[in-house]
Amino acid sequence: MSYKGYQARVEFDADDEIFVGHIAGINDNVGFHADSVEGLKAAFREAVDDYIQTCAKIGKDPQKPYSGRVMFRISPEVHANAALAAELAGKSLNEWAEEALAAAAKKVA
């Protein structure tokens, strides 16, 4: 589920027979639950709206999931090979890496 740029991570709690969700991609812990799909959608939207309103009340900027900037460390060999692959494809390393990550992410989505 997606609402106002936020995504939901949802699991089914078989013991309580409810759907339990959290806003994904932020450090703040914002949860919601319901016993039906329609109720879950409404609870998610309410949780997002409440999160944004609560942040405004306390003077905090709500976290936005994923800025689009990714920083990670890789071995020099992988870096060199990726840079060469990008150059041979006529792309910047950022363009090449975005395409590679997008293709890999589609395999798990």
Image (spheres, rainbow, N blue to C red):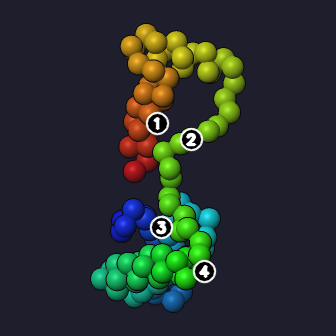
What residue sits right under mark 2 in the picture?
70
Residue 9 bears which disc, if any?
A: 3
Q: Amino acid at mark 2?
A: Val
Identified at 46% across, 71% down, the residue is: 10
Q: Nearer the viewer, mark 3 or mark 4?
A: 4
Identified at 59% across, 72% down, the residue is: 60
Identify the element where label 3 is drawn.
strand
Identify the element where label 1 is drawn.
helix
Q: Separation of disc 4 and disc 1 at Cα?
A: 37 Å
Query: Percent x, y for residue 105?
Result: 44, 43
Q: Earlier in the sequence, mark 3 or mark 4?
A: 3
Please tell me whether residue 47 is drawn above or below residue 99 in the rendered image. Answer: below
Q: Earlier in the sequence, mark 4 or mark 1?
A: 4
Please tell me whether residue 5 is drawn above or below residue 86 in the rendered image. Answer: below
Identified at 46% across, 17% down, the residue is: 86
Check whether the beta carbons of the residues at disc 2 and disc 1 lie within 8 A of each other.
yes
